[in-house]
C-alpha cells in the first residue's frame, strides 16, 4: 500500500492506517521524517483506542518526541493498551514502574507487568525479570531464578541475556561453574556486537579459562571491544603494550 493510500485511509478515520502513517513519519519511510506529524497520527489512533497507536503515542509522550512530555497521559495510554492485550504496552509499563517514571518506583508492580509481557512473548521482559531476580529487586537475590530467565532469553538469541548468563556460568552463581559454556555464550553475544562480551573473550583468551590461551586472540577481541567504546578493553590493551 502506497503513501497516498495510507493517507487516504488514515484521513478517513481508519485507526490502523493512522498508526501506520505515524510509523511512516516517525521513521521517515518514503517521506521526510517528522516527529510532530508522527505524534499527531499516533494520537489520533489512540483517540480511537487503537492499542498500538496508544502505545506509540505514550512512548513519544514519555520521551518528549514530537510533543511535550506528559507522563500522566502516557501511563493512561499504556494502561489502556495493556488492558487490550498489547504486549509492548505491558513491557513499557514495567519500565515506568522500575524507573519511577510518573509513578513512585515499585519493583513489585514492575515485575508484575514484565511477567504479563513475558506471557505475551516478550523476550526483553523475560530478561528484565532475570535482572530483577539477580539483583534481588523484589526481595532476596535469587541466582537460580535469574539463570532460568536468562537461559530462556539466551536460547532465543537475546545477546544481553547471553552475556549475563555467561557471567553467571563463569562465576558459578545459581549454576555450577562452567567456563567452556560461558565462553560459548560470550561468543554468541560478541557476534551480535556486544562490547562487554568481546572484552570477556579477551580476558578469557589471556587466562586460558574456557578458551585456548592466546595473547594474539586476546588482542583481537579487546581491540574489537575498544572500537565499540569499552574502556576496560582499552585499559587491558594498554597493559599488554597495545
Image: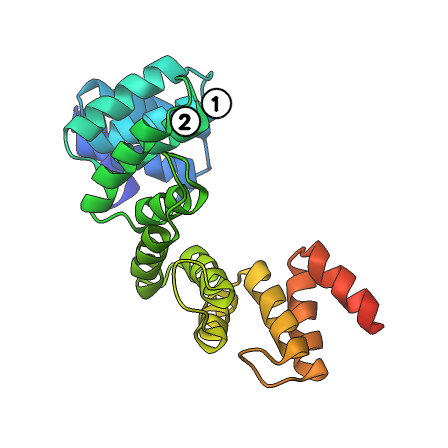
Residue 104: tell me if it is visible: yes
> Which residue is more in the foreground, 182 or 155?
182
Q: Taking 135 as reference, is 215 left or right?
A: right
Secondary element under disc 1, as helix, strand or loop, is loop
Residue at numbered disc 2: 60
Q: Residue 18's spot in the image, x, y percent?
A: 24, 30
- Name, please, the residue furthest toward the right: 241
Label 1 to label 2: alpha-carbon separation: 6 Å
Mark 2 closeness class: few <14, some 14–19, many ≥20 residues within 10 Å: many
Q: Is residue 161 above or below residue 57?
A: below
Mark 1 closeness class: few <14, some 14–19, many ≥20 residues within 10 Å: some
Q: Are marks 1 and 2 in contact (CB under 8 Å)?
A: yes
Q: Residue 225's spot in the image, x, y percent?
A: 64, 64
Q: Taking 47 as reference, is 179 left or right?
A: right
Q: Taking 120 as reference, is 93 left or right?
A: right
Q: Is residue 227 above or below residue 221?
A: above
Residue at numbered disc 1: 64
Q: Which mark is residue 215?
A: none
State which quadrant residue 6 falls in: top left
Q: Residue at x 27, y 47 (%)?
A: 122
Amino acid at each position: 500500500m502506497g503513501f497516498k493510500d495510507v493517507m487516504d485511509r488514515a484521513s478517513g478515520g481508519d485507526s490502523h492506517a493512522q498508526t501506520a502513517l505515524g510509523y511512516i513519519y516517525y521513521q521517515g519511510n518514503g517521506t521526510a521524517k517528522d516527529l510532530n506529524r508522527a505524534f499527531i497520527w499516533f494520537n489520533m489512533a489512540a483517540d480511537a483506542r487503537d492499542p498500538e497507536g496508544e502505545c506509540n503515542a505514550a512512548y513519544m509522550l514519555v520521551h518528549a518526541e514530537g510533543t511535550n512530555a506528559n507522563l500522566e497521559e502516557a501511563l493512561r495510554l499504556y494502561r489502556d493498551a495493556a488492558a487490550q492485550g498489547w504486549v509492548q504496552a505491558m513491557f513499557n509499563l514495567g519500565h515506568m514502574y522500575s524507573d519511577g517514571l510518573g509513578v513512585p518506583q515499585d519493583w513489585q508492580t514492575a515485575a508484575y507487568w514484565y511477567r504479563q509481557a513475558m506471557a505475551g512473548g516478550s523476550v526483553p521482559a523475560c530478561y528484565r525479570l532475570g535482572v530483577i531476580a539477580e539483583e534481588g529487586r523484589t526481595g532476596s537475590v535469587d541466582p537460580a531464578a535469574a539463570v532460568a530467565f536468562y537461559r530462556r532469553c539466551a536460547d532465543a538469541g537475546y545477546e544481553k541475556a547471553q552475556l549475563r548468563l555467561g557471567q553467571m556460568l563463569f562465576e558459578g552463581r545459581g549454576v555450577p561453574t562452567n567456563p567452556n559454556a560461558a565462553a560459548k555464550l560470550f561468543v554468541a553475544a560478541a557476534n551480535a556486537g556486544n562490547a562487554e562480551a568481546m572484552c570477556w573473550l579477551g580476558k578469557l583468551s589471556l587466562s586460558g579459562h574456557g578458551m585456548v590461551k592466546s595473547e594474539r586472540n586476546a588482542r583481537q577481541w579487546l581491540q574489537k571491544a575498544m572500537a565499540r567504546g569499552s574502556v576496560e578493553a582499552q585499559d587491558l590493551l594498554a597493559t599488554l603494550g597495545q
